[in-house]
Image: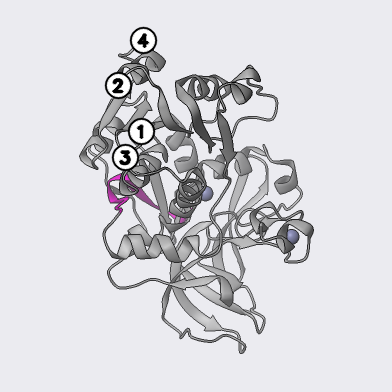
Amino acid sequence: MEMMRAQVLQEPMRFELKEVPIPEIGDDEALIKIKYCGICGSDWGSYTGKYADEVACLPLITGHEFCGTIEKLGKNSQGFKIGDRVACDICLPCGVCYQCRVGEPLLCSSFTQLGIHTDGGFAEYVKAPWKNLYLIPDEVNDEKAAFIEPLTACLNASKKMDCHIGRSVVVIGCGLGIIHAALARLRGAAPVILIGDNAERLEMAKQMGIDITINIKEVADPIAEVFKITNGVGADYVLEAVGHSSTYEQAFKMLRKGGKLEAFGICSDDDLMKIPPVQFVLEEKKISGSCAGIGYDWGDVITLLKHGRIDPTPMISMIVPLEDLEDALREIRENPKLIKVLVDPSAKTRTILYKQ
Ligand SMILES: [Zn+2]
Ligand SMILES: [Zn+2]
């Protein structure tokens, strides 16, 4: 049996770097040799055992933000060849539940995702249904390709928020919030305002073309600031990308009458927000939510990357070998300079890309 190196999450708080069999593929699957697998905020949740349904999947090879090359192809596959560079739609909806059949597979009753519920990318190889693969064009390098999955989540939220040209968008949070703000700008929103607490990241966002940044360490009342910028009207759209009731409440207060809140940040289950229902009725404020990217969000993101409409490169902070996964998970939480960290199973040493 051919073996590979993999980081196996044995139980919450314990990864083990092991030799495990290379996955065997079925007729409808492909084997991918991992180039990079990005570390997501949700990987910390998987690691700490925050998600009960995932704990039930352990032991598991986690990691869902991967790109690589096709090593083997099942016999039913079409249009791909060995050696193709690919990204992978990680969603595995059942296809037959009510939500799937009414065309909302993201809300599938038995929704699973590759690398979250089934073995993923913190390994040398991963298998996936060939129909979930998307070819990466030459114009998109491996670093950008590893960023496709988080970009699909942002793009899906952007489609749901559906901001109109010339209208104001506020994004709260300067992790993936930077991408949300960049997408709003791409859609012609104006002004695009990014609120955060990290001066360096806000500066990075400015260099990526974001109109206005508000550092909450310097501005006492960001709600008043948004009203000032929007001539007392409030924001047409606010996207929350922090994941806390306090910022959701702020987001709601910043909205103009008739404005729309797009919910992206994931709060803990017991975190509750307070909204006066009258704001839904007399002020006609709206909320929509978005939890991930799916299907052709992958194709759309690849097109945007290929044509340089969006470039996440400044957000890629470090590349680490497979053995450093557990350390890197902790470091991301402790070092505010780290935004996206990629794991490279073939690397022997770290590559630091952020300004030290
Ligand atoms: Zn993710
Ligand atoms: Zn389903």
**Residue 229: image tag:** 2
- Residue type indicated by callout 4: Ala
Eyeballing the image, is 310 above or below 215? below
**Residue 166: image tag:** 3
Q: Does residue 317 show up magenta in the picture?
A: yes
- Residue type indicated by callout 1: Ser
| Disc nearer the start of the sequence (3/2) | 3
Q: Which residues make up the magenta segment?
A: 310-322
Cβ of mark 1 under 8 Å from ligand 1: the answer is no
Q: Does residue 170 show up magenta in the picture?
A: no
Q: Residue 47: which quarter of the image? A: top right
Do the residues under discs 3 and 2 have CB atoms within 8 angstroms?
no
| Residue occupying image coordinates x 61% and y 25% | 280
- Residue type indicated by callout 2: Ile
| Disc nearer the start of the sequence (2/1) | 1
Q: Quadrant of the C terminus?
A: top left
**Residue 168: image tag:** 1
Residue nearest the viewer, comparing 266 with 350: 266
